[in-house]
């Protein structure tokens, strides 16, 4: 018997979203006869293997290259046998009733050709792409110049996304989102499938326009919902998005409105499209050159201040040649170390390596400028200023920027888990041994008020799901994680809609899977293997780490020398302590016994200076302790130490092992500095 619904999904490198999507379909199929066809556009993330292993009943079409959305859908449409076709994006999560509601709507409305439902952003807000108008020149014009955003409630300006209509109003519309729409197969067979001139964006508009033109009606129903993850997170200011979107709009206009509107009207619209694309190109260009231009300015300023510091009486006219030459040399060496590649743009290693190389080259230049007797000292001062200026702004950006680096020493995100059942407890345990995922679980929210106040695996059940908003407010929650064994997708979506304006991040862990889905990101929570390959310390990192240890310990010893002497005068005595090291032999360090309590560890800085300890390292373990020896040099502070302070209780041996493993795999100057400053303010 032929299926009632053929579900078509085009996948391109979104394995985790696809897996969650297919699981949601399984929960929504009930007694419906469905077939699922996945077209993979040459993914390299393991999607195909996952489908074959976990969903053997799914029909998989494997493409050798990315054919685009339209061509891939058409491949599936040619073999689809269902009465109805559901076009579904892999990053869409449907409710358990979505298939039934949409099928029932088409069954009960024989005049309907297609139907779509209410789409939500991951934060629970309404996704405006759920329903739209045909982009006639006027509608497209209001969209391009931003009038639709300025006047969303206006019938004149708000037509593109129909923002003047209530979100919960069932209505006939012109266009549905290509991320989720159900269409009658006979309609598609009659009017044709997706137009393959579109590679990305615009295919859904074109198809809906042809449906309307053929006399079919398109409806939007809010009776069921779905989350479309990428809808909110698409970076709409990016040049690639703008050019793809508006080139699709040009294709649509030239195809359907070629003879309908005057040359002047089309000309104004096309001019607006190209103007918007040009502005996007300029923004993209500025973003790409901002870092090197800013660095070049800092290089010039570093040389300028170096000259003013060392040769304050000398006229800068004498250095009009030297400053540009030295700046260009440093810029070239920093560039050659990969500082302006996408991966190395905000890393310190290319800056340090490039600055040292530039120092050596520029130092040789001083022999060719003998009239400037102290130019080598100027070069040395400039080198220090370059390291500081270029390094500091990168550190600040990595910590505070929009794409700040995620580290275990970052501020923990206060988190609650919805559902205290088996799956909720599993998530809790997984999060405890993942140092790279900064969630601080504050408690559970459950369904049964009898569980309130109970402690489950050391974590309290705070309240019921009905009081979620209040829990978020009182506990100052940043993230809400849903365990999907105790909740249906419908309950999850209703809860997200109910609390969407609280400002928290909503995250979902598909049942028994090892990742957390949120917006367009995926956090792995699979337990990392302890027997993993540890990369050896880079020589530059080792030199930098040892240099910082020496400089910091010297600075602290000199700065606290009066306190050191006062402590000795009032009766403190150095006490020897034998500790384990990362090597076989144990070593002796000294602490104060008696005297001022908070100065007890001050003598340890002499051990840092001598190389026995490091500022940042593993925990200090006494030689008589039966614990295993440290796997790397002991330190005054470290990842394990600050985590124990944060949690105000000792870590388990398993947790320590994972934190130590994380440090070994990710040790760098950035990590050490974050740990050091975190330990000061903790």
Image (tube, grey):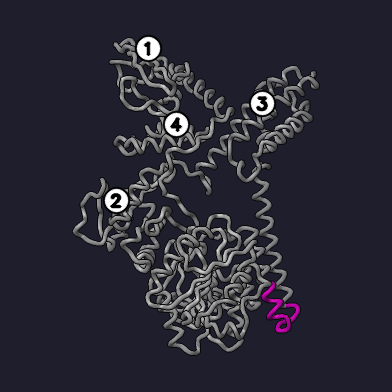
Disc 1 from disc 2: Cα separation: 48 Å
Asked whether residue 547 is in view, the answer is yes
For disc 1, the marked residue is 565
Q: Seen in the image, is 526 located left or right of residue 471?
A: right
Disc 3 from disc 1: Cα separation: 37 Å
Q: Quadrant of the C terminus?
A: top left
Of the numbered discs in the image, which one, if any, rests on residue 53? none
Contact flag, marks 2 and 4 (Cβ < 8 Å):
no
Ranked by sequence position, the earlier of labels 2 and 4 is 2
Magenta-colored segment: predominant secondary structure: helix
* Between 668 and 68, the one nearer to me in the picture: 68
Ranked by sequence position, the earlier of labels 3 and 1 is 3
* Between 523 and 299, the one nearer to me in the picture: 523
Rendered position, 54 above or below 600: below
Residue range in magenta is: 250-264
For disc 2, the marked residue is 443
For disc 4, the marked residue is 676
Ranked by sequence position, the earlier of labels 1 and 2 is 2
| Local SS, label 1 | helix
């Amino acid at each position: 018997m032929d299926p009632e619904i053929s579900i078509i999904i085009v996948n391109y490198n979104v394995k985790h979203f696809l897996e969650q999507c297919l699981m949601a379909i399984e929960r929504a199929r009930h007694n419906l006869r469905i077939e699922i066809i996945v077209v993979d556009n040459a993914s390299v993330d393991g999607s195909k293997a996952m489908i074959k292993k976990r969903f053997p009943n799914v029909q998989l079409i494997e493409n050798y290259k990315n054919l685009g959305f339209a061509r891939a859908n058409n491949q599936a449409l040619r073999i689809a046998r269902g009465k109805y076709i559901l076009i579904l994006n892999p990053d869409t999560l449907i409710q358990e009733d979505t298939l039934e509601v949409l099928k029932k709507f088409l069954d009960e409305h024989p005049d309907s050709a297609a139907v779509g439902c209410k789409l939500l952003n991951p934060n629970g807000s309404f996704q405006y792409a759920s329903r739209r108008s045909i982009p006639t020149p006027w509608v497209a014009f209001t969209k391009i110049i931003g009038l639709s955003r300025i006047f969303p409630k206006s019938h004149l300006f708000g037509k593109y996304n129909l923002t003047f209509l209530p979100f919960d109003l069932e209505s006939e519309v012109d266009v549905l989102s290509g991320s989720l729409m159900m269409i009658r197969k006979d309609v598609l067979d009659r009017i044709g499938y997706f137009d393959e001139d579109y590679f990305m964006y615009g295919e859904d508009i074109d198809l809906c326009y042809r449906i309307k033109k053929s006399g079919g009606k398109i409806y939007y129903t809010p009776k069921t919902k779905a989350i479309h993850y990428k809808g909110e997170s698409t970076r709409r200011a990016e040049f690639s998005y703008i050019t793809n979107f508006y080139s699709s709009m040009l294709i649509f206009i030239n195809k359907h409105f070629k003879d309908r509107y005057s040359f002047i009207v089309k000309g104004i619209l096309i001019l607006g499209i190209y103007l918007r694309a040009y502005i996007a190109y300029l923004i993209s260009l500025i973003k790409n050159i901002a870092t090197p231009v800013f660095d070049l300015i800092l290089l010039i300023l570093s040389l300028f201040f170096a000259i003013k510091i060392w040769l304050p009486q000398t006229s800068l006219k004498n250095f009009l040649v030297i400053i540009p030459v030295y700046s260009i040399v440093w810029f070239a060496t920093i560039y050659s170390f990969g500082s302006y590649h996408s991966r190395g743009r905000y890393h310190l290693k290319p800056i340090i390596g490039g600055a040292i190389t530039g120092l050596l080259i520029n130092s040789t230049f001083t022999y060719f400028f003998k009239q400037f007797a102290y130019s080598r000292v100027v070069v040395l001062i400039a080198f220090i200023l370059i390291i500081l200026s270029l390094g500091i702004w990168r550190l600040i950006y990595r910590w505070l920027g929009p794409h700040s680096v995620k580290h275990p020493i970052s501020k923990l995100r206060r988190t609650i888990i919805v559902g205290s059942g088996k799956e909720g407890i599993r998530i809790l345990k997984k999060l405890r041994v993942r140092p790279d995922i900064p969630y601080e679980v504050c408690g559970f929210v459950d369904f049964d008020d009898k569980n309130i106040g109970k402690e489950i695996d050391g974590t309290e059940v705070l309240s019921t799901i009905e009081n979620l908003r209040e829990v978020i407010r009182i506990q100052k929650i940043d993230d809400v994680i849903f365990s999907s064994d105790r909740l249906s997708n419908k309950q999850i979506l209703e809860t997200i809609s109910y609390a969407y304006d609280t400002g928290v991040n909503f995250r979902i862990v598909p049942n028994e899977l090892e990742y957390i889905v949120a917006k367009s990101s995926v956090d792995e929570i699979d337990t990392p293997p302890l027997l993993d390959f540890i990369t050896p310390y880079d020589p530059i990192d080792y030199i930098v780490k040892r240099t910082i240890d020496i400089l910091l310990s010297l600075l602290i010893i000199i700065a606290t020398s009066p306190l050191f002497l006062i402590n000795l005068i009032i009766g403190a005595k150095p006490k020897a302590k034998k500790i384990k090291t990362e090597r076989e032999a144990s070593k002796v360090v000294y602490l104060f016994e008696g005297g001022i309590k908070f100065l007890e560890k001050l003598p340890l800085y002499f051990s840092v200076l001598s190389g026995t300890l490091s500022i940042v390292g593993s925990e200090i373990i006494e030689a008589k302790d039966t614990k295993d020896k440290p796997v790397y040099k002991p330190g005054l502070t470290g990842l394990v130490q600050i985590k124990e302070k944060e949690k105000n209780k000792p870590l388990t041996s398993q947790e320590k092992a994972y934190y130590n493993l994380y440090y070994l795999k990710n040790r760098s100057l950035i990590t050490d500095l974050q740990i050091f400053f975190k330990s000061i303010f903790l």
